Image (spheres, helix red, strand yellow):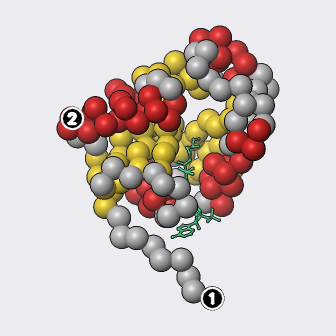
Amino acid sequence: MIAPKRVAVVVRDATPADREWISNLLRERWHDTLITAHGELIDALELPALVIDDRRGLATWRQVGGDAELMTFDAMPTGCGTGTALIEALVARLSKQGCARLCLTTTNDNLSALRFYMRRGFRLVALRPGAIDEARKQKPSISLIGQHGIPIHDEIELCLALD
Ligand SMILES: CC(C)(COP(=O)(O)OP(=O)(O)OC[C@H]1O[C@@H](n2cnc3c(N)ncnc32)[C@H](O)[C@@H]1OP(=O)(O)O)[C@@H](O)C(=O)NCCC(=O)NCCS
């Protein structure tokens, strides 16, 4: 069997020159730069970000106490190793900074993200039934139907312990 070809990637910090691209990407992928998670509305455009050159992936995160929270995570296109390279770079960065965990919130329909994270060591830490129904009141652009035609209702939180 031939192993999938991994493309060499460069991961770098976002710069002010990336701001317009990030804003457009967040609006295209998440309908807004404002992201809802566990009842909070957070402007991802103002967060630290890692970019895969040349703009094939973006991760934004914030510090929450001793943990980091991944707020948005996108690869374009998917399935080419971009997400893996990006999460590995972020984990290395946060471990060096002494973060205890990298946590994130996803939705009950996002089976590909759940697979991606759990394959990379993330553990389920919380289920918030109906949290997306509540979030939709703040952000009506959140889709009713997600991947595989699954109705989107709930939040799932995952964390990765960092060494
Ligand atoms: C979740 C997401 C960021 C993952 O990024 P990605 O670039 O698709 O991830 P990768 O390509 O690194 O890995 C995906 C799979 O493709 C496989 N893969 C990697 N390189 C590959 C290649 N060259 N050819 C074929 N498959 C490949 C990986 O092995 C992996 O499979 P695995 O999980 O069984 O190990 C991406 O799917 C995405 O942008 N989703 C939409 C936005 C989203 O839902 N974000 C998460 C919000 S919580």
Q: Position of residue 69 (x, y in %)?
A: 51, 37
- CA gap, disc 2 to disc 1? 44 Å
| Circle count | 2
**Residue that carries the numbered disc 2 in the rendered image:** 16
**Which kind of residue does numbered mark 1 sit on?**
Met
Q: Position of residue 85 (x, y in %)?
A: 44, 61
Q: Is residue 41 left or right of residue 105?
A: left
Residue placed at 40% from the left, 36% from the top?
A: 25
The answer to whether residue 66 is seen in the rendering is no
Q: Position of residue 57 (x, y in %)?
A: 41, 50
Q: Is residue 57 left or right of residue 70?
A: left
Residue placed at 63% from the left, 55% from the top?
A: 116
Q: For the N terminus, give its image quadrant.
A: bottom right
Q: Position of residue 31 (x, y in %)?
A: 50, 26
- Disc 1 crowd rating (10 Å Cα; few below 14, some 14-19, many 20+) is few
Query: Against 83, is 22 above or below?
Result: above
**Residue that carries the numbered disc 1 in the rendered image:** 1
Determine whether the residue tagged by mark 2 lies in a helix, strand or loop: helix
Residue placed at 67% from the left, 51% from the top?
A: 112
- Disc 2 crowd rating (10 Å Cα; few below 14, some 14-19, many 20+) is few
Q: Are marks 2 and 1 in contact (CB under 8 Å)?
A: no
Q: Closer to the camera, 6 or 47? A: 6
Query: Against 131, is 74 above or below?
Result: below
Determine whether the residue tagged by mark 1 lies in a helix, strand or loop: loop
**Which kind of residue does numbered mark 2 sit on?**
Pro
Q: Closer to the camera, 121 or 35? A: 35
Q: Residue furthest bottom?
A: 1
Query: Against 117, is 23 above or below?
Result: above
Taking the image in four quarters, ligand 1 sits in the one at: bottom right
Q: Is residue 132 left or right of residue 93?
A: right
Query: Against 39, is 61 above or below?
Result: below
